[in-house]
Amino acid sequence: MVSKITEGVKVTVLTEYQPDYSNPVQEHYVFTYKILIENHSEHTVKLLRRHWLIYDSNGTMREVEGEGVVGLQPLLEPGEGHEYVSGCNLRTDIGKMSGTYLMERVVDGKQFRVIVPSFALVVPYRLN
C-alpha cells in the first residue's frame, strides 16, 4: 500500500493480482487496484480528470487520460473520502503505474493536480 498527500488530498493505493483473469502463457496479466481519495483540506474539491502512465517491465508505456474515475467525478467535502476499484492488464508479470488527478476547489474554481504515487503491479511469485 502506498499513499501521498498533495494540497490536502490524500491518495492511497492497494493492488492485487487477478490470477483467474490472467493467462501467463499468452502474456496477459490482470491486476486490480483499490484507490481511496481523502479530502484533508479545508475546501470542498471535485475530481475532474485522471491521467495514468502504465509501464510494463519490457519497456512499454501506455498513457490513459479521461474524465473522472470509473464514470464518476466525485465531490468531496472536507473530511470525506471516495473509494473505487479499477483494473489494468499488462503483457509482463511486473509493471507499475503512476498518475495524477485534476481536481477543482469548488469555492473559487482553482484547479490543481493531485499526485497518485507510483505503485507496483507484481505477480506474487515474483516476490519470492
Image: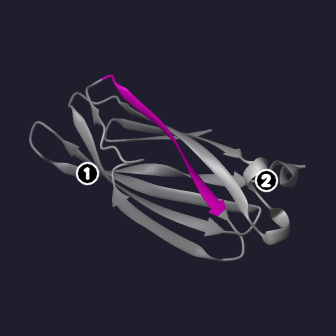
**15 up-or-down from 21: above or below:** above
Give x and y (percent) for residue 64: 45, 65
Look at mark 2 in the image and give the residue it sits on: 123
Amino acid type, mark 1: Phe
Give x and y (percent) for residue 65: 39, 64
Give x and y (percent) for residue 59: 66, 77
Is 50 situated left or right of 23 in this image? left
In the picture as drawn, the residue positioned furthest to the right comes out as 128
Q: Residue at x 82, y 63 (%)?
A: 24
Instruction: Say whether residue 128 is magenta.
Output: no
Amino acid type, mark 2: Val
In the picture as drawn, the residue positioned furthest to the top comes out as 79
Mark linked to residue 112 = 1
> Of 70 and 63, which appears nearest the observer?
70
> Of 114 and 122, which appears nearest the observer?
122
Q: Secondary structure at mark 1?
A: strand
Q: Residue at x 34, y 43 (%)?
A: 72
Give x and y (percent) for residue 31: 66, 51
Q: Are marks 1 and 2 in contact (CB under 8 Å)?
A: no
Q: Residue at x 21, y 46 (%)?
A: 104
The crowd level at tag 2 (other Cα within 10 Å; few <14, some 14-19, many 20+) is some
Pointer 1 or 2: first along the chain: 1
> Of 12 and 28, which appears nearest the observer?
28
Q: Secondary structure at mark 2?
A: loop
Mark-to-mark CA distance, 1 and 2? 34 Å
